[in-house]
Image (cartoon, rainbow, N blue to C red):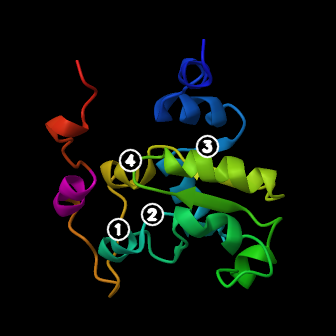
């Protein structure tokens, strides 16, 4: 077996990686987050989707740090450093993405970086919307739930599907 074959024999899918990392992090459901947001000490909401996704719709009061710069935003001495995040390593942080997959990976990474109170929103904003919770756009206008439903359910093109 050559090096390339060995590499492919150990290859994991994204779903496998998410399932593996989910075993080591905390996840909460949309109704759990709704309850937390009703208390005085609300968690920091960290939306790790891309800027255009966040701009279209997000949970009011959430902070946007795209997944691609998360590690440098979570640490000092980088141009992406977010002091509010770095200085609050012990604060409860709920990580949010579209479906709850990227947030699992981000929560795992943040735990490795010393964020011991980071959790992923299971089912992501798709589940939040399905649970009939409000989303706003960048102008703080509430987003219609049906519009959000279309946004959170993109269609996979044939060329993006696993070859048969």
Farthest residue, direction front: 2
Residue at 55% x, 55% y: name it.
Answer: 33
In the rendered image, residue 154, in percent from the top left (x then y), is placed at: 22, 49
In the rendered image, residue 74, in percent from the top left (x then y), is placed at: 72, 70
Confirm whether residue 151 shows in the render. yes
**Pair 1/3: label in front:** 1
Q: Are marks 1 and 2 in contact (CB under 8 Å)?
A: yes
Give left or right: position of 101 versus 132.
right
Looking at the picture, does residue 81 appear above or below residue 37? below
**Pair 1/4: label in front:** 1
Q: Which residue carries the number 3 mark? A: 27
Residue at 41% x, 74% y: name it.
Answer: 51
In the rendered image, residue 7, in percent from the top left (x then y), is placed at: 59, 25
Q: Which residue carries the number 1 mark? A: 53
Farthest residue, direction bottom: 139
Q: Are marks 1 and 3 in contact (CB under 8 Å)?
A: no
The numbered mark, 1 or 3, whose residue comes first in the sequence reads 3
Category of crowding for the residue at label 1, using alpha-carbon neighbours closer than 10 angstroms: few (below 14), some (14–19), many (at least 20): some
Looking at the picture, does residue 114 appear above or below residue 136? above
Give left or right: position of 15 versus 147.
right
Magenta part of the protein: which range?
146-152
What whole-number distance in Å separates the C-alpha atoms at marks 1 and 2? 6 Å
Looking at the picture, does residue 75 appear above or below residue 94? below
What whole-number distance in Å separates the C-alpha atoms at marks 4 and 2? 15 Å
Q: Which residue carries the number 4 mark? A: 127
**Pair 2/3: label in front:** 2
The numbered mark, 4 or 2, whose residue comes first in the sequence reads 2
Q: Which residue carries the number 2 mark? A: 49
Element on which disc 1 rests: helix
Name the foreground residue: 134 vs 26.
26
Element on which disc 2 rests: loop
């Amino acid at each position: 077996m050559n090096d390339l074959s060995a590499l492919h024999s150990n290859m994991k899918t994204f779903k496998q990686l998410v399932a593996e990392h989910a075993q080591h992090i905390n996840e909460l459901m949309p109704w759990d987050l709704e309850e937390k947001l009703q208390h005085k000490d609300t968690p920091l909401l960290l939306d790790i989707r891309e800027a255009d996704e966040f701009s279209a719709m997000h949970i009011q009061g959430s902070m946007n740090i795209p997944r691609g710069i998360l590690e440098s935003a979570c640490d000092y001495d980088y141009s992406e450093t977010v002091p509010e995040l770095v200085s609050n390593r012990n604060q409860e942080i709920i990580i949010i993405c579209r479906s709850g997959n990227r947030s699992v990976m981000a929560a795992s990474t943040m735990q490795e970086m010393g964020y011991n109170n980071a959790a992923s929103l299971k089912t992501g904003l798709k589940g939040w919307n399905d649970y009939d919770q409000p989303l706003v756009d960048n102008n703080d206008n509430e987003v219609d739930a049906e519009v959000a439903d279309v946004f959170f359910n993109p269609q996979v093109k044939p060329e993006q599907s696993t070859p048969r």
